[in-house]
Amino acid sequence: MIQLINNTVIGNELALVWGDGSECYIPLETLRKHCPCAACQGEPDAMGYVVKPAVAHTDLSFQLVSMQHVGGYALQLKWADGHSSGIYSYELLQSLA
Ligand SMILES: [Zn+2]
C-alpha cells in the first residue's frame, strides 16, 4: 500500500513525499501530457484498439490550480485551462517520476 505524505508544487514541478520517506519530482508538463483521462488518452473501441485523440495544449494546460486526494490511492489534478478529469493513481505518479 503506497502512502502519499505530501504533495506540493515547487516551481514547475510537482514534489511528492511518499510513506517510505522517498521523494520524487515530476515536471508539470510531463504530468499533463500523461493525463490518464479518456479525453486525453482515448478509449478502446469495440475491437480493443485505442486511438489517441489529438489534444491541444496551451501554456495554461501546464499550470496546476489545485490537487485533491481521491480515496487514498490517487490525486485528482485541476489545471488552469479548466481540465480536471484526470485522476492520477500513486502508481502512475511514481512511474512518471
Ligand atoms: Zn485529461
Image (cartoon, grey):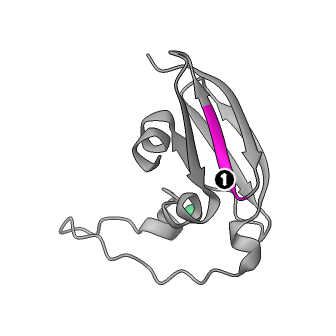
Number of numbered tags placed on the structure image: 1
Q: From the Cβ of disc 1, is ligand 1 less than 8 Å away?
A: no
46 and 35: which is toward the camera: 35
In which quadrant is the N terminus drawn? top left
Is residue 78 located in the magenta-colored stretch of the structure?
A: no
Res 58 → quadrant: bottom right
The residue lying at 56 percent from left, 35 percent from top is: 74
In the drawing, does residue 50 fall left or right of residue 13? Answer: left
Task: Specify the principal SS of the magenta part.
Answer: strand
Q: As displayed, is residue 47 above or below residue 84? A: below
The residue lying at 70 percent from left, 71 percent from top is: 61
Q: As displayed, is residue 30 above or below residue 96? A: below
The residue lying at 50 percent from left, 15 percent from top is: 20
Query: Which residue was labeled with disc 1?
Result: 13
Residue at the left extreme of this rendering: 47
11 and 6: which is toward the camera: 11
In the drawing, does residue 62 fall left or right of residue 22? Answer: right
Q: Indicate which quadrant contains ligand 1.
A: bottom right
> Residue 50 location, x and y as percent?
29, 70
Q: Secondary structure at mark 1?
A: strand
Q: What range is drawn magenta here?
A: 12-16
Q: Amino acid at mark 1?
A: Glu
> Residue 82 location, x and y as percent?
77, 66
> Residue 34 location, x and y as percent?
48, 61
Is residue 13 located in the magenta-colored stretch of the structure?
A: yes
> Residue 4 location, x and y as percent?
60, 24
